[in-house]
Image (cartoon, rainbow, N blue to C red):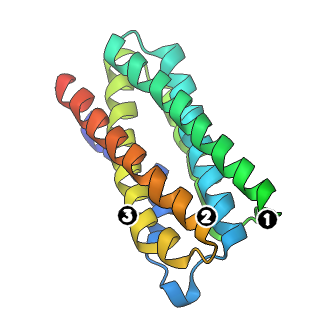
Amino acid sequence: MKRLFAVTLAGFFATGVLAQAQTSPANGPTDPQIAMIVVTADNVDIAAGKLAAKKSSNPKVKEFAELMVRDHTSVNKQATELAKKLNLTPEQSPTSRSLKSDGDKTLAKLRRLKGAEFDKAYIDNEVTYHEAVIKAIDETLIPNAKNSDLKTLLESGKPIFVSHLDHAKEVQSSLK
């Protein structure tokens, strides 16, 4: 039952990213929408990381959560600076709204968990979330980005997300 709950939780969190990943490039997001998707995805992971850093007593989970807050805050800063430089105003889209809504639901569920159950649900969610984000970057965000600087930011950010996924999987293995 706990495993099913964790998988369901991770599924809620990644729904918005996966929905965007399934959008065809012809109907894909605009650069202002991509900017908002990036910022929203980062903010969702920052909020989850802050919660985990506060709630977890597992040093590996705490360390990972603090890394998520630090790295995603940095990516958001870069995205915000680029948007300002390009005079690009991030624009809400169904995807960014879904990411925010799903992130809020996930946080509410995580807040009700404690101890090892919390740690497992948080890390399982992080694995699923980063897999979905990487897929969205590859299949939707990069192919639809029109501005070369935005495309470069997405391409340079991808290795960070891959590294996060690998790290999350390591922590996940240690929790079994």
Task: Describe the element under mark 1 as helix, strand or loop.
Answer: loop
Is there CB contact under 8 Å for labels 2 and 1? yes
Q: Where is mark 1, residue-wise?
A: 88
Residue pointed to by mark 3: 135
Q: Secondary structure at mark 2?
A: helix
- The CA distance from mark 3 to mark 1 is 24 Å
Which of the 4 image quarters holds residue 18? bottom left
The answer to whether residue 175 is left or right of residue 71 is left
In the image, which disc is placed on residue 150? 2
The amino acid type, in three-letter code, at marker 3 is Lys
List the single residue furthest toward the bottom.
26
Q: Is residue 87 left or right of residue 6?
A: right
Q: Is residue 108 visible?
A: no
Which quadrant of the rendered structure holds the N terminus?
top left
Camera-nearest residue between 55 and 81: 81
Q: Would you identify the image quadrant in which residue 111 lies?
A: top right
- Looking at numbered disc 2 in the image, what kind of residue is underneath it? Leu
- Name the side, left or right, on which 27 lies relative to 156: right
Say whether residue 96 is visible.
yes
The x, y position of residue 56, in whole percent, is: 43, 15
Query: Badge 1: few (under 14), some or many (20 or more) residues near its Cα, within 10 Å?
Result: some
Q: Earlier in the sequence, mark 3 or mark 1?
A: 1
Q: Amino acid at mark 1?
A: Leu
